[in-house]
Image (cartoon, rainbow, N blue to C red):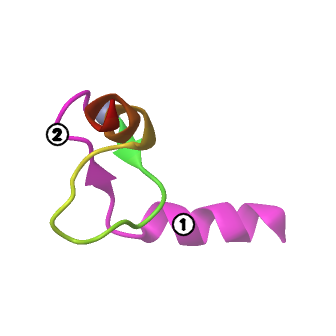
Amino acid sequence: MLEKMSDFFRNLPGKKCEECGNEIVEQYECHINLCNDCLKIKDM
Ligand SMILES: [Zn+2]
């Protein structure tokens, strides 16, 4: 069952961070293409 769940998430259209190229797992606002780490950096 867990494997099916990960397959489901893998099939989702992946967003990549514009800064570091990491895949963005959480869905932020559409116009933000930054991962958690880069968002934190920009906040500071
Ligand atoms: Zn990033």
Q: Residue at x 81, y 64 (%)?
A: 2
Q: Quick check: 23 above or below 37? A: below
Query: Residues at badges 1 and 2 in contact (C-beta under 8 Å)?
Result: no
Asked if ligand 1 lies within 8 A of label 2, the reply is yes
State ligand 1's quadrant.
top left
At which x and y percent is residue 30? 22, 71
Q: Classify mark 1: residues with Cα within 10 Å, few (<14), some (14-19) or many (20+).
A: few
At which x and y percent is residue 37? 42, 33
Q: Which of marks 2 and 1 precedes in the sequence?
A: 1
Q: Which amino acid type is shown beneath numbered disc 1? A: Phe
Quarter-of-image position of residue 23: top left
Q: Residue at x 36, y 66 (%)?
A: 28
Q: Residue at x 41, y 67 (%)?
A: 27
Q: Residue at x 28, y 71 (%)?
A: 29
Q: Quick check: 36 above or below 28? A: above
**Label 1: which secondary element:** helix
10 and 40: which one is in front? 40
Identity of the residue furthest to the front in this view: 44
Tell me: 27 left or right of 43. Answer: right
Tell me: 15 left or right of 8. Answer: left
Image: magenta residue range: 1-21
Quarter-of-image position of residue 42: top left
At which x and y percent is residue 24? 39, 50
Q: Quick check: 31 above or below 24? A: below
Q: Quadrant of the N terminus?
A: bottom right
Q: Which residue is mark 1?
A: 9
- As for residue 18 lying within the magenta part, the answer is yes
Numbered badge on residue 18: 2
